[in-house]
Amino acid sequence: MSLIPKSRAAQVVLGIVGLVLTLLLFAPGLFVEYLWMSELGYEGVYWTILVTQISLFSVVILLAAVYFVVNFRVLVNRLPPSWAANFGQEGQSSAPITRDRVRRLAYTIGGVLSLLFAAGFAGQWDGLLRYLYAVPYGQTDPVYGLDLSFYMLELPFVQALQSGLVGLAFLGLLTLVTGYILAGQIGVDNGQFQLPMPVVKHLGVNVIILLIGWAWGFYLDRYEVLMEGGGAVFGAGYTDIHVTIPALWVMVFATMLLALLVGVNLYQRRLRVLGLGVAAYVVTLVIAMIVAPTVVNQFTVTPNELSVEEPYLEDNIRLTREAYGLSDVTERSYPARANLTPEDITANRETIKNIRLWDPRLLIDTYSQLQQIRLYYEFQNVDVDRYQLEDGYRQVMLSARELTGSLPQGSNNWVNRHLQFTHGYGAVANLVAREGTEGSPEFLVKDLPPVAEDSALAVDQPAIYYSETASTYRLVSTNEKEFAFPQGDDNVYVSYKGEGGVLLDAFWKEALFAYYLGDFNILLSDYLNDSSRIQIWNRVQERVRKITPFLKLDRDPYFILNDRRQYWMQDVYTTTQSFPYSEPIRGFGQYNGIRYIRNPVKAVIDAYEGDVSFYISDPDDPLIQTYQKIFPSLFQPLGQMPEGLRSHVRYPQDMFEIQIERYRRYHMQNARVFYNNEDLWTRPREQYDENQRIMEPYYIMSKLPGDDQLQFMLMTPMTPDNRDNMIAWVAAQSDEPNYGNLVVYKLPKEKLIYGPNQIESRIDQNPEISQLLSLWDQQGSRVVRGNLIVVPIEESFLYVEPIYLIAENLKIPQLRRVIVAYGENVAMEVSLREALNVVLGREILRVQDDIAEAADLPSPAQGRQPAPGEPDAVEELREARSLLQEARDALQEGDFARFGDRLDALESVLDRGVSDAESLVPTDTTAAAVPQAGTSE
């Protein structure tokens, strides 16, 4: 029975059914994506990508179809007449197989193969656009003198074409050989191998095509040599330049000569000559590509490696630094002096106030326990940013209160999932260094509806419809009110008033989305009206990736409060795996194998409306210049980003870690030093939760040496490889006008500067600290040592590590102590101020100064002094705090008698100091909190 009907009408019907099935498979998704992109204003991007994909697919399927049809036509025409008849008898078919039926079957197979081949190659649409719109880099490679954009933008697509040609020829040969074997044209008959001359000619033509593809591949391998690693050099070394590249030329000509020899055999059957030619080709391949490089490497390079490879090492160093944006790194010396004075601390009060005491890895648990409030909210991660608050430029930790991915049991129904629980609500924020009550953070934004303690953090519309973890589509502006936030025993419900999502103002749109999402409740529900909208692809990264599938995204979009609105900012990268002499990245997840990276784009997503805007932060990147030509309406200059948002642009951590991974070796620009790895660096280790781990870079606010301006930057210390002392520290500046600048401060090599792991060891060796931490660990609680922060200050270093206590039955980390190390001194006290006072040997930050500052009064040095014999309020407050901490410790240890004594003593001190405190702080200076709109949706 034939798979293809004989009737012309039946064939037409079959074709129509196939077309309808194809449309049902692909058209809904394409149309949904078009509506979604149009709603965002990026239909131009949609059409550019789609037209390129269709054009590439059409050209490739046409060429592949011609190739397969011609080959299968020749194959069918050369079938012996007896084959079809014998096959029909053996199968006892009711209808004997005719040559026409075999031809139709062959064409069908060819069509399927062409379709699969074209569908796979259509994925090269991005490479095609890069090739067509390539922008010059402005620098050339040291071997061929070609502009670097050839490798980045043109070579990958040319290599894809070559691979496609070889793949097509190989697939054709495999299919033809199989067909001829089934037809009995190739095989063994009476002990002799049968290969008729017509079959030889047919297969020979395809072999020639395959050999031409191989020759082209050898030619392109000349460029690939510049990107291969091996030996001392990443890229072309001595052996590659003097042996491998000439050998590749030899293989190009040898392969073409072999193709010519095969062509001759199509007309004159000289199999002996052809066999000798194949043998000579194999010998040439082995000698040219294996033996010769091995001999030269063994007898010329290895005994003299440094001298012969030195010029190529210089190319390797220069171009790797260029590829990872390290060419413009500023290197400075940092004396790391050990004579920090109280005046230095006073001059850097703003730095001290912004030292981070809250570890994001633990703070997320505190947020969840104290501010999640209901089971249908969750906090994903904590972002670190800076804000201009009423009391100055401050570093702030912030997390969005997002809607959970799965509703509580019993409420996980269709209406709740898609109509009622549609969004998260507000955020939680705290200063990085200020402690509230009972070891918890002092919140700047908290509760539901959110209340902000500073107007810079207040928002008018706290609803978060677009977030990091939105798990499904939402239907908004429906007849069913949406849950906003709890209020007492009741809930507040609202309706979405924004324009985010595709408007469902027609029945066909409802039907389209119902079919595409496989959820026909959309079509059947009475809750929808002409103003209803459907929000799909509402995760931040999913949203950006849908618009720009040709770019890579940083792993951490961060939340921003600006101009009384809420946004997400996503760092976007351009990368390529094709860059000469650049050492590729290994072990970095999605970045594995890349040889070039830039962060030229900042994507901003409105958390309520869902609008996505792309701003160019590095206009010199040739990749983004190319994409600007391809998509002229997609990107905007960074200067068009609102000023408030621009003040929250920060250097991305993924980019910084990749650059540090390369810089740890490629900071050595002397080829001889580089060759010997004389000054190899690494990222330090720290102790966290009883484990040693690689120290993560961290954001910090400090003043760089010689600069009076407090700056927000991403930094990391560096240590020598296999050593723990600190050798340098690296900072990436985030504030304008210095955004993107990398500064490396190298430390003196002639003296010991403690690294983070050495400070951790000194903390472990301190008997008082170890005894107290061990005691806490045995009282039903767990001690966790947070981030060790190395703080550069006045050409010196402070080391700060917070200590947290976590009860076994309640996962709320409490900040109980702060450890400060400076020079040879280590102290653990209840506050950063007290620890600083201990390690520096005198009182630095006075309590009454802080009180005066908070009340907007002159400090005691400028105003009222205690009269002779009058109790000192400072000493009373210090004594009160000490007694309070002793009472807490006694309660934690179960010593209730000592707890009572300390509490009585505390009460006495407080009673004695009330009058002095009242004289210092007027009663009318309390700042009012800034309430945020809670029901204005």
Image (cartoon, rainbow, N blue to C red):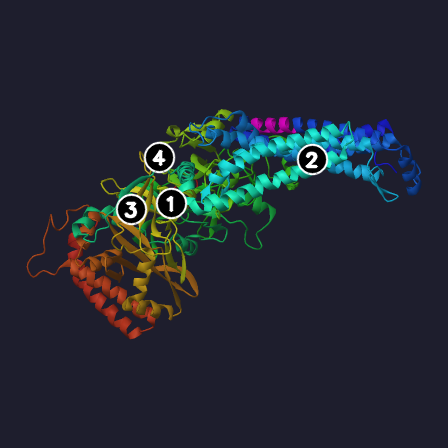
Please tell me which residue lies in front, 640 or 898: 640
Percent position (x, y) of residue 700? 32, 46
| Residue identifier under label 2 | 277
Whether residue 676 is visible here, answered yes or no, is: yes
Cα–Cα gap, marks 3 and 4: 34 Å
Which kind of residue does numbered mark 1 sit on?
Answer: Phe
* Structural distance between the alpha carbons of marks 4 and 2: 72 Å
Answer with mark 4 or mark 2, whichever residue precedes in sequence.
Answer: 2
Q: Earlier in the sequence, mark 3 or mark 4?
A: 4
- Which contiguous range is marked in magenta? 46-57
Q: CA distance from mark 4 to mark 1?
A: 44 Å
The residue lying at 49 percent from left, 53 percent from top is 375
Which residue, given by chain and number where applicable, does mark 1 sit on?
Answer: 674
The numbered mark at residue 644 is 4
Q: Secondary structure at mark 3?
A: strand
> Marks 1 and 2: which is nearer the front?
2
Q: Choose the circle earlier in sequence order: 3 or 1.
A: 1
First in sequence: mark 4 vs mark 1:
4
Q: Give the label, 3 or 1, closer to the camera.
A: 1
Residue beneath label 3, please?
Answer: 746
Task: Residue 31: tell me if it is visible.
Answer: no
